[in-house]
Image: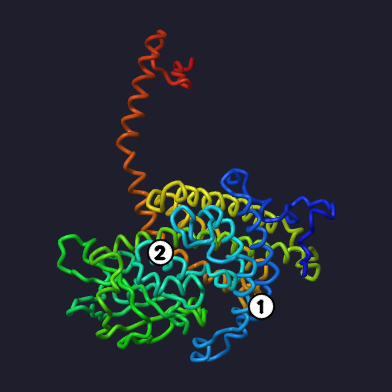
Amino acid sequence: MSVPYRIEASTGLPADGAGSQLRASEKIPIMARPFVSDRAKKTLDIVEKFVEEECIPADPIYAQQVGSGVEERFSARPPIMDDLKKRAQELGLWNMFLPKNHFKEGAGFSNLEYGLMAEYLGKSHTASEATNCAAPDTGNMEVFAKYGTQEQKDKWLKPLLAGEIRSAFLMTEPDVASSDATNIGLRMHKEGNEWVLNGSKWWSSGAGDPRCKIYIVMGKSDPNNSSVYKQQSVIFVPAETPGITIKRMLSVYGFDDAPHGHGHLEFNNVRVPASSMCLGEGRGFEVIQGRLGPGRIHHAMRSIGAAEKALEYMLARLNDPRKKPFGKQLHEHGVMLERVARSRVEIDAARLQVLNAAAMIDSKDAKFALKEIAEAKVFVPQVALDVIDRAVQAYGGAGVSQDTPLANMWAHGRTMRIVDGPDEVHLIQLGRNENKRGKWLLEKIEWQKKKSEEMARSYGHEKRDVLQLDRQHSKAKL
């Protein structure tokens, strides 16, 4: 099978001037090329072909196979997803997200290399899961790989890496300001060789899927600890543990994201073995910071792909000969071309920011790249939202309906400004860190002014404004 935009280099046909004939490996930003291996380039081309030719056409079939009705939709296992997973494994597209310099369990790519691949995965609803690179499993697998005991890895990481089960990360709560993790209130107390959990969690993405077998849960295990950052722990809880109730699923601007979904759960005297503790009691903040850093950059990577897809839809609409408002095609209206140009500029800038953050992580670790990750986490989703919004505007009524994927893409993109820490939290921290330079910069600028005065005197000059005029007018003669 081939698609219209793909023209193989062997045909000798020229590119159309806009780069649409180029393979993914040929579109890697030149600044990033030295960091991309030949193996990664080949894989990137396979990812592009798989997403464009198999996953995107499968997206509406998947949506149809999920079915209708709450019970059916959150019990569904669409056959087309199993077929896509099988195909992805045949192509060697599996677990690409685990960076080679930090984990031995992945496919052997760097964060930057995976970032280029994740961009294409972000263009399809099914592609990330099909390649076992879907959130929240990616971040959860990193938790198991980085902090899990061998027993925990054998029990949960292996089936997750094999794509046999799915997982959920339970941190956010309905009754507190969860953007400040010190507010997390689900209580854990120890009884004998067990931990007992009581409380509520919501926005637990993935909890609706019947294949979700393990929850990673953050709770308060030592509320009286003098350090608010040592009061929390993270513990692994099997989804079928007695005492857990999935009360309801939450919609995102009306979309239920079934069968994956976002659950509101209640824990009522849920008991798990003490061996289920992750890393150690009171080390919850250490775990979540280790998890959320990579998760934030993965979201940004996929958001680039969503923005590119929106731009593709916009360009297709602008060149649809059936659409001629006021006697002209949309591309003949200057305002539309300006929107296309702004979208191109913003997407390219966002991509470089994501790749820079990924390269910083590769150079050391996610903690080393906190600033770059935060910048990408704030900037990239907003770019995606702006581009998607322009595409919606180009389509008019069709853009806000189910006749295009744009409305769903916008709803998903809007959540990116909230998940893994709202924009405000990252901006405040970025601002505080940037402001630490303020006193030194004030002193530097004052020193430079004094140095300039000294230099002026050494040349026999007085300090004088170059535009100083000192013009005086005498009294007019009568």
> At label 1, which amino acid type do we have?
Asp
Expressed as whole percent of the image width and height from the top left, the position of residue 219 reads 27, 72
Expressed as whole percent of the image width and height from the top left, the position of residue 223 reads 18, 69
Disc 1 and disc 2: Cα gap in Å? 41 Å
Which residue is more in the foreground, 257 or 289? 289
Q: Secondary structure at mark 2?
A: helix
Specify the quadrant of the image occupied by residue 207.
bottom left
Q: Residue at x 43, y 70 (%)?
A: 157
Expressed as whole percent of the image width and height from the top left, the position of residue 119 reads 58, 60
Expressed as whole percent of the image width and height from the top left, the position of residue 199 reads 27, 80
Q: Is residue 472 above or below residue 202?
A: above
Specify the quadrant of the image occupied by residue 401.
bottom right
Q: Secondary structure at mark 1?
A: loop
Picture disc at residue 145: 2
Q: Residue at x 42, y 48 (%)?
A: 364
Residue at the spot of label 1 = 403
Which residue is more in the foreground, 320 or 136? 136
Q: Is residue 122 above or below residue 397?
A: above
Taking the image as shown, residue 342 lies to the left or right of residue 199, namely right
